[in-house]
Image: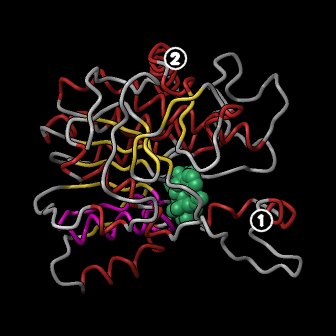
């Protein structure tokens, strides 16, 4: 692994962190030999897709994992499977709806003891029409960013008590084209666009990891991750035309991944690496993709095919601090 001697957020003129793991390494592979016995983890959205594979890898390494999901019943089979697997840590399920402030408060309020790992993984993508929470928040921003920010804030004492806790925020390459719009985050005045709303929420996720540098003195690190392209339930809001435009549906309606797509197990690797690998100990405020730190670019227009990139707008420390204040105030009044 190479290190950035200046620390802090990634910059184009600093060496990037690298690891020996290739883009399609599996989640279990990146923490092979790591013993998480006695560590406690929360994985939001752990009942499906990338989250399930994150849970599997952390539990297989011995961690006690809590799956936070809207529908606890959907995790029952996974809990049974891991309970039957010898050597795996205990897996629990708790109800959490990230778009409902009372649910986030209840989850954080009920947590007891230290928390070593928080994987902010749950997410929704490209809701076709502007959808608001009862409190008036755009649903993707509420779920992908605001709920996770409030959850981490509510769990701050537990994370601090762990001594060297890690937060992993699952972002997306979609952040590249959509900076956070402080003037109109909920699309009250600008036209709603499903991808701009998703991308904005994912820029906010990266900014959250950058803003969390204020918790470094508590031993807490936070980093953002782009898992890559993986066919999961995340695509549930895409119609056939959109799936064809992505190249993953043929003219007869058959869905199949493109060669560069990952399996959920491969998609979970970068999250698991950041959550538990000794290679990333002490690293904070950065953005990773394909198990490597991504190169900083100005935005979507500079994106180079096949290269892991993060937009400068998502690593901007001033925007991160402004967003932290925004998120804090939003939840205080919710
Ligand atoms: N798949 C990709 O290609 C891709 C690419 C880039 C980034 N990502 C990111 O990766 C993460 C995981 O996505 P995935 O592909 O694994 O999709 P997924 O299978 O749909 O998983 C998303 C999870 O989020 C949960 N969730 C949604 N809304 C929630 C809410 N209000 N409260 C609590 N949980 C909620 C869902 O739980 P329910 O069962 O309750 O619906 C589901 O378990 C997401 O943040 C996504 O944006 C995925």
Q: Residue at x 62, y 67 (%)?
A: 233
Identify the residue under disc 1.
247
Q: Residue at x 30, y 69 (%)?
A: 28
In depth, the one of 68 and 13 nearer the eye is 13
Q: Residue at x 42, y 61 (%)?
A: 268
Q: Is mark 1 within 8 Å of ligand 1?
A: no
Q: Quadrant of residue 148?
A: top left
In depth, the one of 50 and 282 nearer the eye is 282
Could you say which disc has been placed on residue 319 in the image? 2
Snapshot colouring: secondary structure
Element under label 1? loop
Q: Quadrant of residue 86?
A: bottom left
Q: Is residue 105 left or right of residue 100?
A: left
| Residue 304, x across and y down, in percent | 63, 41
Residue 129 included in the magenta stretch of the image:
no
Any part of residue 123 in sight: no
Q: Is residue 148 left or right of residue 241?
A: left
Report the label total.
Answer: 2
Dot 2, how many residues are within 10 Å of its Cα: few (below 14), some (14-19), or many (20+)? many
């Amino acid at each position: 692994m190479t290190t950035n001697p200046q620390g802090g957020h990634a910059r184009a003129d600093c060496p990037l962190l690298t690891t020996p793991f290739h883009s399609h390494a599996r989640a279990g592979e990146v923490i092979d030999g790591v013993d998480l016995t006695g560590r406690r983890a929360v994985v939001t959205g752990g009942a499906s897709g990338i989250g399930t594979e994150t849970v599997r890898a952390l539990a297989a390494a011995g961690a006690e994992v809590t799956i936070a999901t809207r529908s606890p019943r959907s995790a029952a089979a996974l809990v049974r499977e891991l309970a039957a697997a010898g050597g795996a840590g205990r897996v629990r399920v708790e109800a959490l709806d990230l778009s409902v402030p009372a649910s986030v408060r209840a989850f954080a309020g009920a947590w007891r003891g230290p928390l070593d790992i928080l994987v902010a993984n749950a997410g929704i993508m490209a809701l076709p029409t502007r959808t608001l929470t009862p409190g008036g928040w755009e649903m993707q921003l509420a779920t992908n960013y605001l709920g996770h920010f409030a959850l981490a804030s509510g769990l701050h004492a537990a994370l601090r008590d762990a001594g060297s806790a890690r937060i992993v925020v699952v972002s997306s390459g979609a952040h590249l084209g959509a900076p956070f719009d402080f003037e109109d985050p909920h699309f009250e005045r600008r036209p709603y666009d499903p991808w701009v709303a998703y991308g904005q929420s994912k820029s906010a996720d990266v900014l959250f990891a950058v803003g969390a540098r204020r918790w470094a003195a508590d031993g807490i690190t936070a980093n953002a991750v782009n898992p890559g392209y993986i066919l999961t339930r995340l695509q549930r809001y895409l119609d056939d035309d959109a799936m064809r435009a992505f190249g993953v549906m043929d003219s007869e309606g058959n869905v199949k991944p493109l060669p560069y797509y990952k399996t959920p197990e491969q998609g979970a690797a970068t999250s698991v690496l950041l959550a538990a690998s000794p290679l990333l100990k002490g690293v904070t405020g950065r953005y990773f993709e394909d198990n490597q730190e991504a190169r900083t670019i100005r935005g979507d227009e500079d994106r180079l095919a096949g290269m892991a990139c993060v937009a400068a707008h998502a690593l901007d420390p001033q925007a991160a601090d402004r967003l932290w204040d925004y998120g804090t105030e939003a939840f205080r009044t919710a």
